Amino acid sequence: MVERIIEIRNELVREGKIFESHREAALKLIESGRIVPWNEKSGELREELGLPRKREKCAEEVKTLLKLTGFESLIGGG
Amino acid sequence: MKSSDSKSHKSKSSDLTSPTSQSSDPEFSLFLGCIAPNRYPAIESCTELVLDKLGIGYEVMEEASCCPPPGIVRSFDELTWLTLSARNLSLAEGREIITICNGCFSTLKEASVILKNHEVRDNINQHLKAIGREYRGDVEVKHLVEILYSSLDRIKEVMERRLRLRVGVHYGCHLTRPSSILRVDSPENPRMLDEIVEVVGAESVEYDDKMLCCGAGGGVRSSSKELALTFTRRKLESLKDADVDCVVNSCPFCHLQLDQGQAILRKEGMNIEIPVLHISQFIALSLNYDAGLHQNAVPSERIVEKLEEKL
């Protein structure tokens, strides 16, 4: 059942049917490698706890992969 | 070795710490996901603290990306979901991965099973080749809850205070489902989280809608906040009816929805005020650390005071 729902949703996205908020989330992934990206507030909270301000070392590789899989053009982030 | 920019200090009660011990030959790779490091970093700190205290060697997967989640990315394009998952799995270099999030767990574990198929893996590796990586199909994935559950005796040894609290545990959807692949616990009547909170002295309270979704998953929170909040409200009302002191979860996304959901409901005149703790924070409290609860939207002074009263 779940597999079929995923197939249907994949088909709908290929037809351009996607919630705008979902498209925005996908664009964040394309841009930063993360659906929930780091921001200044994250940095402040992390520093307060003695953690490194930022742990983000994936964006370039993710961008390359999202081009190769066609995700970037699918979502319209190219 | 873990990143050298991680501070190494520790203290009790007054502030939370970052990890103190690093293993030169770690058994596990720690996958942090997105929400914990970027919205609730106390979950990250507490996880590292707890693993250190239990003597479990790990290395943080510094180069990991978003898992990516089943509801948002897998639903859009399965190939992309599997490719990014394979990249993350390849970073573990053959070590077992520990996840601290149900969504990350479900994604990485399901992907690891799919990628045991040579043909599928070869196809995905064609993409990974472009970034100089390869996934060999040899990584196992565990949730922190499984690690804690297999360490109950050790937790009893290292705990410094009993948490005499009434706790409602929230399993979420992706810790146990799909059960045929994840094989963690019963999908209908799981017990692992209950037993973990009980080992540090809490009472796990049964409540209506215990297995109800928090409302956030499946892309619902981002596309339909009101619908998501309908689930959250019902869940929180059931917890309130059960007179719990706090709710303990195993997923930063559920954590966010249950915590920030209460902030939204407060603006609508509904004051529930049930502190929300990730299981790592709950165990950190039993180790006598404050667990960074002040960074939550819901104040947690009530449970801290209650713990102090019962010392």
Image: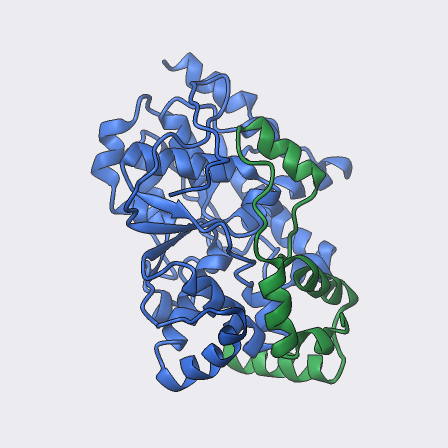
Identity of the residue drawn at 66% across and 55% down: B228
- Above or below, comparing residue B233 to residue B215 in the picture: above
Q: Which chain is blue?
A: B
**Left or right position of B130 against B285:** right
Identity of the residue drawn at 52% across and 35% down: B42
In the rendered image, is residue A74 in sight?
A: yes
Q: Nearer the viewer, residue B77 or A72?
A: A72
**Left or right position of B191 against B280:** left
Rendering quarter of residue B215: bottom right
* Residue B147 in picture, x, y percent from top left: 31, 48
Identity of the residue drawn at 37% across and 73% down: B113
* Residue B199 in picture, x, y percent from top left: 28, 35
* Residue B30 in picture, x, y percent from top left: 41, 49
- Quadrant for the C terminus of chain B, please: top left
Q: Which chain is green?
A: A
Q: Nearer the viewer, residue B51 or B119?
A: B119
- Quadrant for the N terminus of chain B, please: top left
**Left or right position of B236 against B286:** right
In the rendered image, is residue B296 in sight?
A: no
* Residue B47 in picture, x, y percent from top left: 42, 39
